Amino acid sequence: MDCRNCETSLNDSINYCPLCGAKVVRKRLTLKNLWYDISLQFFNVDNKLLKTFTHLFTQPETVIHGFIEGTRKKYINVIQYFAIALTLVGVQVFLMNTFFSEDLESAMDFMKPLEEATGGKDNPFNSNPLGSFEEINRYQSLIYILTVPMYTLATWLAYKIIKPIKRYNFTEHLVLNLYYNAQIIIITAVLSIFFLCFGFNYLLISSFVSLLLFAYLFYVLKRVFNVSFWEALAHFLLVMIAFFIVIMIIGVLIVLAGFLFALIFKDQISAHI
């Protein structure tokens, strides 16, 4: 008998391939067997998904250090975990645009006095706030993906300056930030839908969740780098400063690129207009 994943020759009495770790499948695929595999992977108390999620709260250093140092079977792979989080974002966007569009619109009621005060068709506050929310929601997954390298640059630069005892290279910082961002994506999606179901204002929800996410980042940095409270606070503030500097630099580069593009292709743009 050979392993169907890596084609290693196997003994008939073993249940897992000693080379690739894959489970040996002997039964024919049926709905019953398929449901058993799904429930074992996702609904079992000891499954990897639940364990990864809970341990990123209780012992994030174990999950992150473990993956960096080579432990790949105990928890979900960092890329897979991030992909699961992005899938949940798709569910969140669908629910928000389908069932909570009126709540999102009412959340922007504070803009109405600005519309009435300035008036005019060229008033920038006259744009439809719901439309802007829908546009942001539509590209939510892309925004999260682009945020990861920004966070990675921020933590890498900050800890490059600090030079702690436990040092990570850029790729290891990427792993840290992928796990962190996947966790906050899941938290944001679940809490946003939960609070919207009870009629909470979306802006209040976003503000509350943002505070939790910053607190969680502080907690993760403290646990991963094993420093005191005040050291962790100093590290966290430096990471935030580095993050906003990275955003500003990227923003300036985008503006410059757009300006250069407009200069280079000015004639073609004028012709189309």
Image (tube, rainbow, N blue to C red):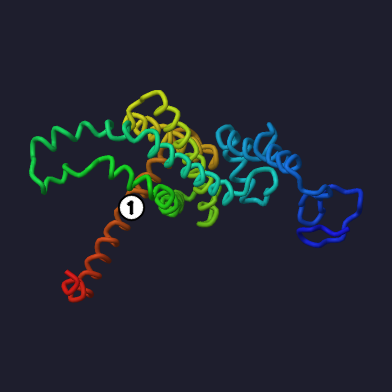
Q: Position of residue 98 (x, y in %)?
A: 40, 38
Residue 263 visible, this orientation: no
Residue 142 can be seen, yes or no: yes
Residue located 76% across and 42% down the image: 33
66 to the left or right of 219: right
192 or 263, nearer to the observer: 192
Q: Quadrant of residue 30?
A: top right
Q: Secondary structure at mark 1?
A: helix
In the foreground, 266 or 157: 266
Q: Looking at the image, how many numbered discs can be counted on the residues?
A: 1
Location of residue 4 with respect to 188 vertically, above or below: below
Classify 99 as above or below 23. above
Per the image, the residue denoted by label 1 is 247
Percent of width and height locating residue 196: 39, 29
Label 1 environment density (alpha carbons within 10 Å; few <14, some 14–19, many ≥20)? some
81 or 232: which is nearer to us?
81
Q: Residue at x 13, y 32 (%)?
A: 113
Estimate the x, y position of residue 93 in percent, counting from the top left: 42, 42
Give the percent coordinates (x, y) of residue 49: 62, 39
Q: Which sits in the foreground, 253 or 272? A: 272
Location of residue 104 by image quarter: top left
Q: What type is the residue that disc 1 sits on?
A: Ile
Q: Residue furthest top?
A: 198
Q: Quadrant of the N terminus?
A: bottom right
Q: Which residue appears at 43% of the width and 41% of the height?
A: 94
For the C terminus, give its image quadrant: bottom left
Q: Is residue 257 above or below residue 111?
A: below
Residue ID at (40%, 32%): 209
